[in-house]
Amino acid sequence: MTSFNHLVAGVVLSLACLPGLTDAGAQGSTAGGGNPAAVQTYDLARFAPPAGWQRSVSPNSSVMYSRVDSNQGWCQLIVYNSLGSAGSLEQDFKAEWQDVAVQKLSATGPSGVTDIPAANGWKCRSATGTFTHGGQPGTLIFQTFSGHGKRLTAIGLTNQKSYVPTIQKFLRSVTLAGTASAAAPATAPPPPQPPSPAARSAFQFTSSNFDDGWTASVQADWILVQKGTSRVYIYYYFPVNADMRPPNGNIRDNLWHRFVKPRYTIVSENENRKTMIHEWKEGEAVDRQTGERVYLAMVWDGNFFLAATPDRDTSCRLFPSPDALIAMNRYNKFAVAAADVVGTWQSGGSTTTQWYDSVTGLAAGATLAASGAVFTFNRDGSYTSVHSGASGAVVGGMNTFQQEFRGRYTVNNWQLAATNRYQGRTDTFAAHFQAVHNGRLLCLNDNQGGRYTLVKVR
């Protein structure tokens, strides 16, 4: 009910305080209230709202006409922005009912589903539903148009049956322009945005094109992964400090507030695909910079991912679960140039196991395993790599090793070949860079069990 409270309760309460809508101003009026005003337009729609009703516009979202009367009755008439068609009236109606009636209003229905005549090559379907607000039942009358590659919905909401004729009259007045009135042919889908230009970098390769149609580019604060009008922002790692954790709110809401809301005007929000494991939030929004209406999905699992798609259906298809969005990290992958690997790169890690006697419960010692690798690539094509490690009991039983290789190396975008490896052979590593803030990690895999994620140390 959160979305509905935002949509209905916030508007109604504010209308009750406007001049001319007090009890005195409402005296002598019928519940339906007001003669039709002059025909008005919004998006593709033309309609005749009742005269004297309060008009409010949510940019790139909807226009609404509202009235509150002295009997605590209220009514809202809303026309939403047009969206791309899902392909048929049946599909468009289902999508709009889900997004508007179910997600925003928690309405039941639809009932009385009827196809009604519409002009200019459009098709139209009407239905009714019910909802509850403040413990009182309400009536929803719902109307979706489909055609010319677009869909558009108009609705009426009220808590008084006496307003139903006014809603019906308003919805009958709604007509949509034909293709000649559109700025571009209505059947043409919105053109894909070109990949954003990559940020300036000391590295040769700052973008990647993948066989499945996705592209990735290195930006100042994130990696932008894009396909058509769908975009994923893979943020570089940042610490989540105490001021973003309980008791200072939860991580999810703090991330949404600090990173999402400054860039987008939020229209609705929910957590429908949330799991117990990940911090998740999603909802409709408008890009503050471009005015584009998008559907957002955000997840944090130690790293922060934000997806912006044209609509909810696309979001659910591309990212049916938080794990699917997190898996987009696989596109943080950029080719390697020979000049970019020159220097010393290092990796390492360790693990410790504490042992206890199963009978006495007393400590029985600890074992440790640690390993590290240092690769140095020189400008003249020579290299050295040193591999060292230790394992065994922490006290009195540690075994160590060190192995060094020297040879020549060559780089070819996604491969690095090194001579004189184990037993004198030449190993060909699968190689790529992973972008991090102001730098790269060098990832090497010899496909024989040797995998290294290396950071440049000099």
Image: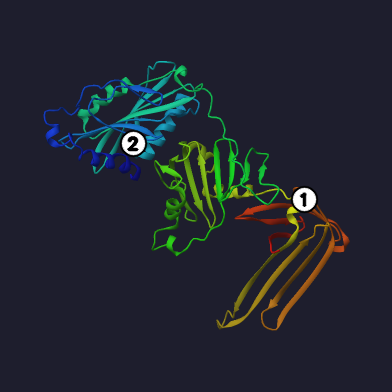
| Rendered location of residue 249, percent (x, y) | 39, 59
Please name whichever residue, 50 or 287, is drawn nearer the observer in this view of the structure: 287
Q: Position of residue 106 (x, y in %)?
A: 34, 40
Q: Is residue 437 above or below residue 207?
A: below
Q: Name the residue beneath numbered marker 2.
A: 108
Q: Report the side of 441 relative to 229 (left or right).
A: right
- Identify the element where label 2 is drawn: strand
Quarter of the picture containing the N terminus is top left
Residue 318, by quadrant, is top right
Residue beneath disc 1: 415
Q: Position of residue 40 (x, y in %)?
A: 32, 23
Name the side, left or right, on which 54 lies relative to 310: left
Residue at 47% across, 43% down: 296
Amino acid tagged 1: Gln
Q: Is residue 104 left or right of residue 281?
A: left
Q: Amino acid at mark 2?
A: Thr
* Label 1 vs label 2, nearer the camera: 1
Instruction: From the top left corner, tell me how far across and down residue 194 is, in percent.
Output: 59, 36
Q: Is residue 136 visible?
A: no
The crowding category of the residue bearing disc 2, from other C-alpha atoms within 10 Å (few below 14, some 14 to 19, many at least 20), is some
For the C terminus, give its image quadrant: bottom right
Q: Residue at x 47, y 55 (%)?
A: 276
Q: Are marks 1 and 2 in contact (CB under 8 Å)?
A: no
Residue 373 in view, yes or no: yes
